[in-house]
Amino acid sequence: MPKYIFITGGVVSSLGKGIASASIGKLLQSRGLRVTLQKMDPYLNVDPGTMNPYQHGEVYVTEDGAETDLDLGHYERFTGIATSQLNNVTTGQIYYSVIMKERHGDYLGGTVQVVPHITNEIKESIRRLARHGHFDVVICEVGGTVGDIEGLPFLEAIRQFRQEVGRGNAINIHLTLVPYIRAAEELKTKPTQHSVGKLREIGIQPDILLCRTEKTISRKIREKIALFCNVDEEAVIQAKDVKDIYEVPLMFKVQKLDRVIMRLLGLKTKGSDLARWEKEVVEPALRPKYFTKVAVVGKYIELQDAYKSVYEALRHGGFANNTRVFIKKVDAESIQKWGAEKYLKNVQGLLVPGGFGNRGIEGKIKAIRYARENKIPFLGLCLGMQTASIEFARSVCGLKGANSTEFDKGTAHPIISLLEEQQSVKEMGGTMRLGANPCRVKRHTRTYEAYKKDLVYERHRHRYEFNNKYRKLFAQKGLIVTGVYPKGELVEIIELKDHPWFVASQFHPEFRSKPDEPHPLFREFVRASLQNHQTLKALSPGEDEEEGISPK
């Protein structure tokens, strides 16, 4: 039977439970343990697929096509595991399953209640994941903040679960906040005490506390937290702000968090080894030799989490090139209104990410035209590939009014359109082309130079496709198809012949990028950006890592 770690959060949201969970997973992996992680989201949506990025942030897509919480991206990037639909559970999924069972007659004669039926379904989702593989440790992160009404069924479920498997087989870790009051120049423990008190009212006693703080926690404060929260002093772990998120496993290791976990769960393994992680990830993240500036032209740039995997994949590409990638966030509507040169004249690369809807589309098209005409390295992702195709059709092929039927159903030149099987789809959730699909790569292309493989598998999240009727014309004008879906000859990758580096994919390569294994397209895009104008740009100390430009 695997051991279980339940991670909760208190005081405020956005403390970084996902990164903490992923870092613990990495730390235990470094000891040779087989680990998986699960995110429990309290919202009533079945999945985040229909939610606005401003509401939820990025929708992360797994290999099997599940639309999930962005924390699964952290799990995969830190641990390298391939998550699935079993790794993300929502209140919507739980209630839907229970209601379907009730309609089927599984509870015939009984009253269906939150306890035991909902809590039993939550516990079964944990066991289902545990049965899915041979794991030593299952880490379950409960979303939200202790005290939220919607999170109560999950907290009750993990309380019961620990009682059922035994105290030596499950532990509770609570991530909390120790705020620094600048006027008093003091760290305050009272929010942590109240948060733990709330948990104990529910029946959960934390075994370990992760204390988020911007200042170093003294021995005296640790003793106080341990005393008032009823935990061992060695189990009060400082989660201090770091320069880079990939330092967190090293920070936990220094404080011997892994040893505390091993002792509480009765596990015995070899010592941890994070030398490769430190050398190939943390070192280039903190001390790169070069820099390059890349513009990301999107629709949701005001929210950092909306393009989380894109930003991380750019950084990974930088690690591979010993380069810091400064990200200039540009709102597509600003370019649509004021033109591309104002925002793109001082960048070495342009990336246009995915998205849905008509807002900002013409701005993206203007940005792509600027990159194409000025020989700026370009990487388009999903909608970025579609807008690149529309721009090429209009500007190079002379197809006036060319568009996607998503934005103009009556366009005379539907460069992007719905597949026949998508025409009759009415439901919005989970009905797109989702998950990993094969892509056959054409040799003697920049795409092949990046992958060095004839067949790759990439994750998709889209409904519209490139219209094959225009492939021949595009090839004649210099835009070639370098990757196709073998079964249906669907266009997966395009690239421009007469350009330093101009590649766009229908899929989302950012979902498969890891800090210690950067995605080939991001690695080569960053390399091309770095070499733009035949120069290697030495890093300038003190320059801001990100430069945002608002729509205003």
Image (tube, helix red, strand yellow):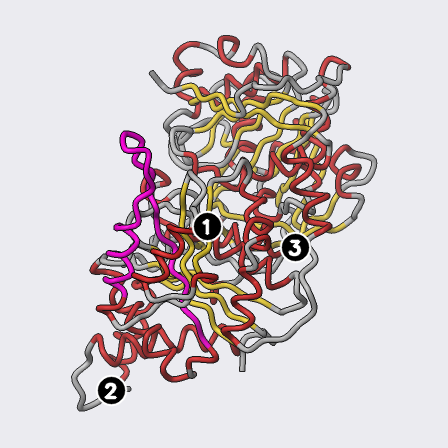
x, y percent for residue 410: 39, 30
Amino acid at pointer 2: Tyr
Q: Is residue 312 above or below residue 143?
A: above
Identity of the residue drawn at 49% across and 8% down: 342
Which mark, residue 487?
3
Amino acid carrying mark 1 in the image: Gln
Magenta region: which residues?
A: 170-199
Left or right relative to 297: residue 441: right
Compare residues 403 and 300 and report the one nearer the observer.
300
Report which residue position mark 2 lands on. 107
Q: Is residue 333 left or right of residue 252?
A: left
In this orientation, which residue lies closer to the viewer: 353 or 438? 353
Q: Is residue 88 visible?
A: no
Q: Which of the image's four quarters has the N terminus?
A: bottom right
Task: Specify whether residue 222 is in view.
Answer: yes
Q: Which residue is the site of mark 1?
A: 238
Q: Quadrant of residue 197?
A: bottom left
Q: Nearer the viewer, residue 502 or 133?
A: 133
Is residue 471 found left or right of 125 in the rendered image? right
Q: Which mark sits nearer the N-terminus, 3 or 2?
A: 2
Camera-side residue: 446 or 189?
A: 189
Which tag, 1 or 3, sits closer to the chain's start?
1
Residue lying at 53% horizontally and 31% vertically, measured from the top left: 384
| In this view, 371 is above or below 71 | above
- Secondary structure under tag 3 reads loop
Q: Which callout, 1 or 2, points at the residue further toward the start of the chain?
A: 2
Residue ID at (18%, 88%):
110
